[in-house]
Image: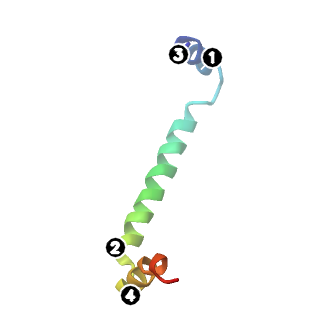
Amino acid sequence: MLKFVKNHMESITGIEIYPLISLVIFFTFFVALFWWVFTAKKDYINKVSNIPLDH
């Protein structure tokens, strides 16, 4: 099954760019998320973390 998929994908022209695009999107998302976590205000984090406890 994997051999069939690999052979089929190799026959498509220009497909080699898609894994690179996926990697760039994945890396950018997690770098942005990492940056947001470390720059978030502590008051905001405490406020959001208490939302489930407030009824």
Of labels 1 and 3, earlier in sequence is 3
Residue to which mark 2 is pinned: 38
Which quarter of the rendered picture does the N terminus lie within? top right
Q: Position of residue 33 (x, y in %)?
A: 43, 64
Assess disc 4: are there few (<14), some (14-19) or many (≥20) residues with their C-alpha within 10 Å of its C-alpha.
few
Contact between labelled residues 4 and 2, with CB atoms less than 8 Å apart: no
**Between tags 1 and 2, which lies in front?**
2
Label 2 vs 3, first from the N-terminus: 3
Q: How far, Cα to Cα, is label 1 from label 2? A: 44 Å
Q: CA distance from mark 4 to mark 3?
A: 50 Å
**SS at circle 3:** helix
Residue 25 location in percent, x, y? 51, 51
Quote the CA–CA distance across marks 4 and 1: 53 Å
User: 26 or 45, which lies in front?
Assistant: 45
Q: Amino acid at mark 3?
A: Leu
31 lies left or right of 17: left
- In the image, 24 versus 49, the foreground residue is 49
What amino acid does circle 4 point to? Asp
Residues at badges 1 and 3 in contact (C-beta under 8 Å)? no
Residue 45 spot, x, y in % from top left = 40, 80
Q: Amino acid at mark 2?
A: Phe
Q: Kindly report the distance in space between the C-alpha atoms of the residues bearing marks 2 and 3.
A: 41 Å
Q: Earlier in the sequence, mark 4 or mark 1?
A: 1
Q: Nearer the viewer, residue 40 or 8?
A: 40
Q: Which mark is residue 2?
A: 3
Q: Which mark is residue 43?
A: 4
Query: Which residue is at a point 47% across and 44% down the rendered structure image?
Result: 23
Question: Residue 8: which numbered mark, if any?
Answer: 1
Residue type (three-letter) at the residue carrying disc 1? His
**Of the two numbered discs 1 and 3 in the rendering, the one whose residue sits closer to the viewer:** 3
Where is residue 26 shown, x and y percent of the image?
48, 50
